């Protein structure tokens, strides 16, 4: 009897954990520029939210800020190295992305033989697109996106924070000079 209760409790825990996992319910992908030295960025500033929808933009802004800080980037208005742009799109969206190696693998090798392989996506209603833009060149260097974010009408309090975290899971890079281990030394920008 004790074993049955323990198994039942285990099943409930698994079901609850699965229902909290946003990555199973949304499509997440990213694209980036092969022309970029990602190891050179350390600061950022925000551009205005595209298609401002009130609280959603504020929640997404705060979540992006949290993710950038976690990677060692500093928010500044004085000559940032990156500009952060983000938009929330309510309708279905046709989008051209690229089949690319995982960004960390490319940054580690900077293999010049990689080519852009276009891929067309039909993104479901409710898409967040986050773009990191080189402040000197105004070129998008990385773009992460999550589609189908409005599929869950009973979203938890931290739902958009979790969606943004899932997007930034695609950007495992750290700011130039930031050591994620807290040792205070250089991390080679990764």
Image (cartoon, helix red, strand yellow):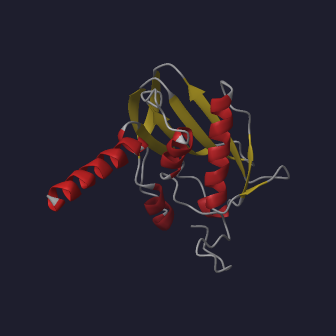
User: Compared with residue 51, is residue 37 higher up or lower down, i.e. above or below?
Assistant: below
The C terminus is located in which quarter? bottom right
The reply, left or right, for residue 39 in relation to residue 97 is right
Task: Residue 37: name its quadrant.
Answer: bottom right
State the residue in front, 164 or 135: 164
Instruction: Give the residue at the far top of this rendering.
Output: 91
**Residue 178 location (% of width, % of height):** 66, 70
Query: How many numbered markers are drawn?
Result: 0
The reply, left or right, for residue 57 in relation to residue 160 is right
The N terminus is located in which quarter? bottom left
User: Compared with residue 6, is residue 190 higher up or lower down, i.e. above or below?
Assistant: below
User: Compared with residue 15, is residue 2 higher up or lower down, i.e. above or below?
Assistant: below
Residue 22, visible in the rendered structure: yes
Name the residue: 42% across, 27% down: 151
Instruction: Give the residue at the far right of this rendering.
Output: 78
State the residue in front, 7 or 187: 7
**Residue 59 location (% of width, % of height):** 64, 38
**Residue 29 location (% of width, % of height):** 44, 42
State the residue in front, 117 or 45: 45
Residue 85, visible in the rendered structure: no
The reply, left or right, for residue 86 in relation to residue 91 is right
Name the residue: 82% across, 52% down: 79
Task: Residue 139: name its quadrant.
Answer: top right
User: Compared with residue 187, is residue 44 higher up or lower down, i.e. above or below?
Assistant: above
**Residue 189 location (% of width, % of height):** 61, 67
Name the residue: 46% across, 23% down: 125
């Amino acid at each position: 009897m004790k074993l049955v209760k323990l198994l039942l409790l285990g099943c409930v825990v698994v079901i609850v954990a699965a229902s909290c996992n946003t990555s199973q319910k949304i499509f997440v992908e990213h694209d980036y520029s092969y022309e970029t030295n990602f190891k050179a960025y350390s600061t950022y500033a925000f551009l205005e939210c595209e298609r401002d929808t009130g609280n959603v933009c504020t929640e997404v802004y705060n979540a992006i800020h949290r993710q950038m800080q976690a990677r060692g980037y500093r928010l500044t208005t004085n000559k940032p190295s990156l500009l952060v742009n983000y938009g929330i799109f309510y309708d279905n969206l046709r989008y051209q992305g690229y089949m690319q190696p995982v960004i960390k693998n490319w940054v580690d090798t900077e293999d010049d033989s990689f080519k852009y392989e276009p891929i067309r996506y039909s993104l479901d209603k409710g898409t967040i697109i986050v773009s990191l833009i080189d402040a000197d060149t105004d070129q998008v260097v990385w773009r992460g996106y999550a589609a189908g974010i409005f599929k869950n009408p009973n979203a938890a309090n931290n739902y958009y924070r979790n969606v943004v975290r899932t997007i930034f899971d695609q950007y495992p890079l750290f700011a130039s000079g930031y050591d994620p281990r807290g040792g205070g030394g250089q991390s080679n920008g990764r």
